[in-house]
Image (cartoon, grey):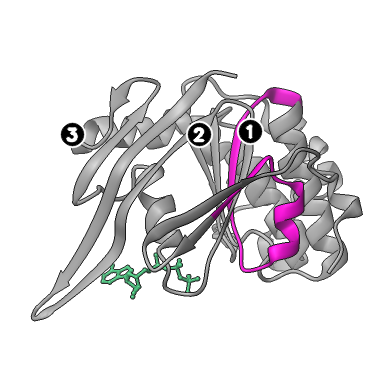
Amino acid sequence: MDTLIVARNLSKVYKMGEVTVEALRGVSFELMEGEMVVVLGPSGSGKSTLLNIIGGMDKPSDGELFYMGTPLHSSDGKQLTSYRRNEVGFVFQFYNLLPNLTALENVLLSVQIARNPLSAEELLKKVGLADRAHHFPSQLSGGEQQRVAIARAMVKNPRLLLCDEPTGALDYKTSIQVLKLLQDFCYTYSKTVVIITHNAAIAQMAHRVFYLKDGRLDRIVENENPLPPEKVTW
Ligand SMILES: Nc1ncnc2c1ncn2[C@@H]1O[C@H](COP(=O)(O)OP(=O)(O)OP(=O)(O)O)[C@@H](O)[C@H]1O
């Protein structure tokens, strides 16, 4: 497996008036092509901050971050926009679909900005929603909306898929469907998938688990035999 991301000593300090928050304090790791990483940690430990920095939505205060050898920590706004657009897919807890566009149109929006997109229709079929393509988000269940959001992220054909609490608003059965899609994207297309979650059970399907504590990467645990999502229970 090739190295996709190298992070060295990342720190992030938020300053608001008199108050300084050290959200990340010297975090170092690598992400390999085709691996699934789950990030666990208590509320406020820096998980979202880390994901935002890896995804080019925010910059570290200090440290280095390389994507396939390109330094992101010193990239300008235009370079980061191109990185986010072409290399990274995002999945959020509350789907973030545009309410006035159909499922298909939401996915097509992503196609328009991508350099090397896949077929929107194919992706909707893959997530099991071919027959709901012309429905608006309000006509879809939470799980269906999340599957549209996953199709929208995958259709760009990104090397890296970043997911912030992707099953946080879903019931068990629907969560497993969503996790299957994420694992399939990782395994079938050899993509790197990073999942932030509060649900420690999900860590069983990862190749590696990052434990964040107080802005530090407390430990990294490797799973020799990651479980298929249908074997994960909580
Ligand atoms: N934009 C910001 N401005 C100021 N402080 C921030 C900002 N974003 C995050 N923080 C602070 O940085 C710390 C880490 O926050 P972060 O959201 O990364 O944690 P988290 O592990 O994702 O938490 P949760 O599980 O609750 O989502 C927290 O103390 C938070 O209040």
Identify the element where label 1 is drawn. Answer: loop
In magenta stretch: residue 44: no
Q: Is residue 222 above or below residue 18?
A: above
Read off the residue under disc 3: 74
**In which quadrant of this rendering is ligand 1 seen?**
bottom left
Q: Earlier along the polypeptide chain: callout 1 or callout 3?
A: 1
Identify the residue shown where x is 54% and y is 60%.
96
Residue 159: percent from left, percent from top? 54, 28
Tell which tag, 1 or 3, sits nearer the viewer: 1
In magenta stretch: residue 201: yes
Q: Circle 2: is it few (<14), some (14-19), or many (20+) Cα within 10 Å?
A: many
Q: Amino acid at mark 1?
A: Glu
Identify the element where label 3 is drawn. Answer: loop
| Measured Cα–Cα span from mark 1 to mark 3 | 26 Å
Q: Is residue 151 above or below residue 188?
A: below
On whether ligand 1 comes within 8 Å of the CB at mark 1, the answer is no
Bounds of the magenta segment: 188-210
Read off the residue under disc 2: 31
| Measured Cα–Cα span from mark 2 to mark 1 | 7 Å
Horizontal relation, residue 49 to residue 234: left or right:
left
